[in-house]
Amino acid sequence: MGGTAEVTEDANVITESKAVVLPGVGSFEAGMRGLKLKNLVGAIKEFAASNRPMLGICLGAQLMLSRGNEFGVFDGLDIVKGEVVRFPPLENKEKIPQIGWNSVYKSGLPWEGSIFDSVPDYFNAYFVHSYVLVPDSRENIFGTTEYGGYEFCSAFKSGNVYGCQFHPEKSGHVGLEIIKNFLKLV
Amino acid sequence: MKNIRIIPRLDIKGPNVVKPVQTEALKIVGNPADLAGFYYSQGADELLYMDIVASLYERNLDFDLLKSVAENIFIPLTVGGGIRTIHDVNNALRAGADKVAINTHAVRNPKFITEAAREFGSQSVVLSIEAKKQADGTWEAYTDGGREHSGVNAVEWAKKGIEFGAGEILLTSVDQDGTRKGYDLELIKKITVFADIPVIVYGGAGSLESVLGVIREGGADAVSAASIFHYRDFSIADVKNHLRANGINVRI
């Protein structure tokens, strides 16, 4: 893809990086616990505050909000104001977690020059999640998706800091485009 | 309604993709990396990659081969065959799997499902059930690639598997596999009626109608097939277009 990536648990590496991807699968509490254990919370928040490109994916995106509500209430990284809440009961008895492909729609913020640059106005992406992003401000909502009659934020943006509920790395060609666009931000 | 996933299945033996017919006759149908790449480019929603002798021969699947296959596809990959320990799960995920399918070892030790789910998340753990109809009208769960008796009732096992923490069920009809004569709807309905996790069905896809039926009447959340794709009876687009024309949502 034209970039070199390093997998790290070292706060110094994060501080010196040009871009950071925060992936994650698992529970909110476990994710935050892991970050605290490795002393990464400060470095990640500082990186985001510097407005260098950052991309949270799935649980990574969820951790970037203020609070998570899985198995209790837990503080997140508070990089973007908002909550992480469980799907409510859904229409058509749709199952939770959502596992599969769904459409991400533009929701008011322009996509030009962003990680969704040149991506069609709606695209299919792969989701695996039981909890959803609920940013406080509509100004951070960058992409929306509907599942079981429930519309939710599937991508947020705050300057160069992005979060995707879906997995771009598992979303075929359009996912690769998104990753390429992220690298272009560096 | 959500999009139903279409998942081609690659049965792996040694370096080849093969197609067994009811676990007896074997035909080589292609090269794993090539076939995976082909189905990816043809619009597959996910891929299933199952080493069909690892369990029987009491060895692991070839993680290097898996890596070479996973490298060039960017859709979810579920991998199974001889997954017996957390270490095996870890190796599979590192080699490029997004989910692992477990059968034999889970039947012998159901707590393995819970351990794997705890370690890697339940969304990474697919319980693979190979069900064979018995004379008394019930289905038995077979192990070792659908070859060995376990004495376990398949439907009851599905219930248990969900309780133990599986993220999805991969339900195979051993009787219908390779026949292209249709899915075992009776079996499938018995499980989809209570399963609150997604059920991926496999075994028997023949006509386009059979695929539509297993979704509409069977309640399948995802459909896996091998023969109809490997033998080019239908393309993935043929299947998706037929479903769409009949009111089933699919990713186009």
Image (spheres, coloured by chain):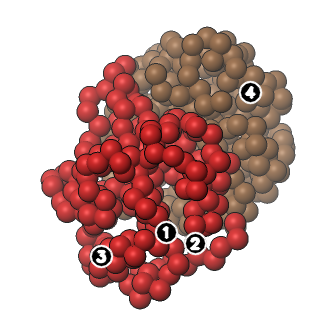
Chain identifier of the brown chain: B
> How packed is label 4: few (under 14 Cα within 10 Å), some, or many (20 or more)?
some
**Separation (CA) of disc 3 from disc 2:** 22 Å
Label drawn at residue A53: 1
Name which residue lies at 41% across and 88% down: A12
Q: What chain letter is assigned to the residue under label 1?
A: A
B217, above or below B233, in the image:
above
Left or right position of A51 against B5: left
Same chain for mark 3 and mark 2? The answer is yes
Name which residue lies at 79% across and 40% down: B26
Return the disc, 3 or 1, that comes first in the chain's sequence: 3
**Separation (CA) of disc 3 from disc 1:** 17 Å
Label drawn at residue B237: 4
Q: What chain letter is assigned to the residue under label 2?
A: A
Q: Tell me the residue that label 2 is attached to.
A: A186
Circles 2 and 1 in contact, beta carbons < 8 Å: yes
Q: Tell me the residue that label 3 is attached to.
A: A41
Give the color of chain A as drawn: red
The residue tagged with tag 3: helix, strand or loop? helix
Left or right position of A79 against A54: left
Instruction: Return the x and y of residue B130 as percentages of the image width and height.
Output: 54, 35
Of tags 4 and 1, which is closer to the observer?
1
> How packed is label 1: few (under 14 Cα within 10 Å), some, or many (20 or more)?
many
Name which residue lies at 72% across and 15% down: B207
| Amino acid residing under circle 3 | Val
The residue tagged with tag 4: helix, strand or loop? helix
